[in-house]
Amino acid sequence: MNRLEQAFSRGKAFIPFITAGDPSIDVTERLIYRMYEAGADLVEVGIPFSDPVAEGPVIQAADERALAGGVTADDVFAMMRRVRSSCDVPVALMTYVNPVVTYGTDRFMMNCRESGIDAVIVPDVPFEERDELLPYCRKHGITLIPMIAPTSGERIRMIAAEAEGFVYCVSSLGVTGMREKIGHEAGEMIKAVKAVKDIPCAIGFGISTPGQAAELSAYCDGIIVGSAVVKIVEEHGENCVGHVAEYVRRMKEAISG
């Protein structure tokens, strides 16, 4: 069993997102350890980028803080090598295509492998253009996670047929961010995926409360939360680790009932 399979092997998976380098790369490293201890089944780590088109204001601001602190992709890879020396948490790296291509796609995926990253999520590469990245991912054993959204329609079956690792189901239209109400289109999307392939499906975008997580977990195999976690980091800065760990514990508890 690889680490991605491990993430979905213990019931419903809880997947928190953090922006690498916010408030510092050292705090990011501590967050990964503590979130894993608190019940995170997979951690999604974002490489800060100046034009994160899929992100709402909370994660955009985190990217700006991390970039102002000088954090680079190489810093993230170095941090992950330290993590891997003592921690087996599954990790997916979230980035955009421009930083990957600028870095050198082959070199980027090689560094993912060498630093123990299991998967990459690249929101601005549509399924039809995945061959920009897929050959390099396969060469280095990195899983490219597909995303589906309410607008994917008939393409969902096509995406599901080729999917590896898990399917990231975008719960609602628009950018990331906390929402009071989340529609149930994700349930129909997941049914369409499962009709084609028995692969884990995780729902993200907008989820922030234990109640929302518990409700949506009835439809899926995992819950992804970004903005709510990043907001705690923003509020508490260097002292955020304990607060984030407690939030992760409560969210994991909510979907495990």
Image (cartoon, rainbow, N blue to C red):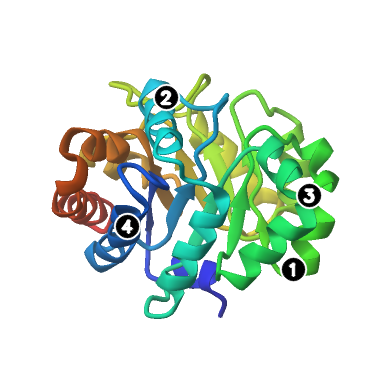
Task: For label 4, count other residues whose C-alpha is less than 10 Å away and answer few (under 14), some (14-19) or many (20+).
Answer: few
N-terminal label among 3 and 1 = 3
Would you name the residue on which mark 2 appears? 183
User: Percent position (x, y) of residue 97?
Assistant: 70, 38
The residue depicted at 51 percent of the width and 19 percent of the height is 174
The amino acid marked with disc number 4 is: Asp
Would you name the residue on which mark 3 appears? 133
Badge nearest the viewer, 1 or 2: 1
The amino acid marked with disc number 3 is: Leu
* Contact, mark 2 vs mark 3 (Cβ under 8 Å): no
The amino acid marked with disc number 1 is: His
Q: Is residue 187 visible?
A: yes
Residue closest to the eye, 159 or 205: 205
Per the image, label 3 sits on a secondary structure element best described as: loop
Would you name the residue on which mark 4 appears? 26
N-terminal label among 4 and 2 = 4
* Contact, mark 3 vs mark 4 (Cβ under 8 Å): no
Distance CA(mark 4)–CA(mark 2): 37 Å
N-terminal label among 2 and 3 = 3
Task: For label 1, count other residues whose C-alpha is less than 10 Å away and answer few (under 14), some (14-19) or many (20+).
Answer: some
